[in-house]
């Protein structure tokens, strides 16, 4: 799972030459390009089929590079970096004037993060050694636009295979869902995308739980589009107590379904694909995208997901599933 010295060299050569490299992070795999090179960044949008006004996250080797990309960085943002970097937290900050509009979607802010994955960090350090100490890698999730984010190198191959010259394999992603995004560019920090780092974690630094503001259309956070993270197969959420009846009714109509549930083990006599998920939100998040991907390949007409607990700890997973339902079945 560890890339060789040669793999890293090839990755750096490709990035310096303005080409794409898929990289592992602790959240999901990213599709990376030199963030200071607008032509290279344009290749990301082409490979994903993503609208060009969606801003990208710039990945950095360490805090030292932040001032090169952002200005008027508030004290609270430095505290968040100290506490959570390297790790699954993206900060939205006022951008420096030079930062390419291709990266920021034409906005006056930039998203920055130091990822907590040894392969990503090693690549970022080597890229900075080659390009200059503040160099950054712009990387959205390495899936086609609107589809399920990849959490293994194989998934990236399925999504983008021939569109990316190199996929660095760093094993399965530990967190499994995208970073928490917090906007520090408009006064009081606000969560734009929930993730593994939760309001409770953030409270330890901020002294209170930040507001969550994921309203579609508000800032250009592509995670805020309703349809996202979506399988090709239609997807439905069904309450646990109705699950078996629902599946039986479906069968009697001749429909095949796949089931994703954290509480009910595979049922005897049900020839369907059945995935028993971890019953805690961290474990569930870790397995979520791989489960959706597997079920999408199971040759069924419908993926049935048991509804989640209403608890705040499940917010990030519930957010991804809600968007997956909105976007499913459109392939
Ligand atoms: O965990 C992650 O964040 C992964 C890994 C690869 O680092 N990346 C990721 O990228 O999820 P992407 O492009 O799929 O999602 C990035 C999100 C988008 O919703 C984008 O709109 C938002 O970050 N974003 C980036 N810059 C922004 C900005 N200046 N203002 C508001 N939202 C921004
Ligand atoms: Mg994405």
Image: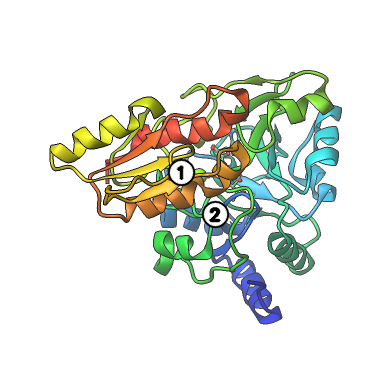
Point 61% across, 49% down: residue: 27
Q: Is residue 3 above or below residue 229?
A: below
In this rendering, would 140 be left or right of 302?
right
Is residue 239 visible to the viewer in this orientation of the structure?
A: no
Image position, residue 250 (x, y; %): 20, 36
Give the number of callouts.
2
User: On the rendered structure, is 228 left or right of 5?
Assistant: left
Q: How far apart in space, not on screen, are marks 2 and 1 (Cα)?
A: 10 Å
* Picture quadrant of residue 194: top right
Observer-nearest residue: 34 or 227? 227
Q: Secondary structure at mark 1?
A: loop
Residue, disc 2? 41
Residue 303 visible to an observer of this rendering: yes
Q: Which quarter of the rendered image does ligand 1 occupy?
A: top right
Split into 4 quadrants, where in the image is the N terminus?
A: bottom right
Q: Residue at x 40, y 52 (%)?
A: 293
Bin the neighbour count of mark 1 within 10 Å (Cα to Cα): few under 14, some 14-19, many 20 and up: some
Where 77 falls versus 117 (above or below)?
above
Residue that protrudes farthest toward the left in the picture: 253
Say if mark 2 contacts mark 1, CB within 8 Å: no
Name the residue tied to disc 1.
52
Q: Residue furthest bottom?
A: 6
The quarter of the picture where residue 108 lies is top right
Numbered label attached to residue 260? none
Q: Residue at x 13, y 37 (%)?
A: 253
Element assignment for label 2: helix
Residue 72, position in %: x, y? Answer: 80, 30
Image check: 317 left or right of 127?
Answer: left
Q: Earlier in the sequence, mark 2 or mark 1?
A: 2
Which sits in the foreground, 160 or 152? 152
Residue 178: image x %, image y %? Answer: 58, 43
């Amino acid at each position: 799972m560890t890339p060789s010295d040669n793999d890293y060299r090839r990755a750096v050569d490709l990035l310096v030459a303005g080409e794409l490299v898929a990289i592992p992070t602790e959240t999901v795999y990213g599709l990376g390009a030199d963030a200071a090179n607008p032509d290279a960044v344009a290749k990301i949008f082409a490979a994903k089929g993503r609208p060009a006004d969606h801003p990208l996250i710039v990945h950095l080797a360490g805090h030292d590079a932040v001032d090169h990309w952002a200005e008027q960085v508030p004290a609270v943002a430095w505290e968040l970096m100290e506490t959570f970097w390297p790790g699954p937290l993206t900060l939205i900050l006022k951008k420096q004037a030079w930062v390419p509009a291709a990266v920021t979607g034409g906005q006056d802010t930039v998203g920055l993060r130091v990822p907590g994955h040894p392969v990503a960090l090693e690549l970022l350090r080597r890229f900075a050694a080659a390009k200059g100490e503040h160099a950054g890698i712009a990387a959205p999730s390495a899936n086609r636009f609107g589809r399920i984010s990849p959490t293994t190198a194989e998934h990236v191959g399925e999504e983008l295979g021939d569109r990316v010259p190199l996929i660095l394999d760093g094993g399965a992603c530990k967190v499994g869902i995208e970073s928490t995004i917090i906007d520090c560019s408009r006064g009081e920090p606000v969560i734009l995308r929930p993730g593994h780092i939760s309001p409770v974690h953030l409270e330890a630094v901020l002294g209170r739980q930040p507001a969550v503001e994921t309203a579609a259309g508000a800032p250009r956070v592509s995670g805020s589009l309703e349809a996202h993270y979506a399988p090709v197969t239609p997807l439905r959420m069904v309450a646990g107590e109705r699950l078996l009846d629902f599946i039986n009714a479906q069968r009697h109509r001749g429909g095949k379904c796949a089931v994703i549930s954290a509480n009910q083990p595979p049922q005897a006599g049900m020839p369907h694909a059945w995935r028993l998920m971890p019953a805690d939100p961290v474990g569930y998040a870790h397995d979520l995208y791989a489960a959706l991907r597997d079920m999408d390949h199971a040759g069924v007409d419908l993926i049935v997901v048991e509804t989640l607990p209403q608890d705040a700890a499940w917010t990030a997973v519930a957010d991804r599933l809600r968007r997956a339902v909105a976007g499913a079945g459109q392939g």
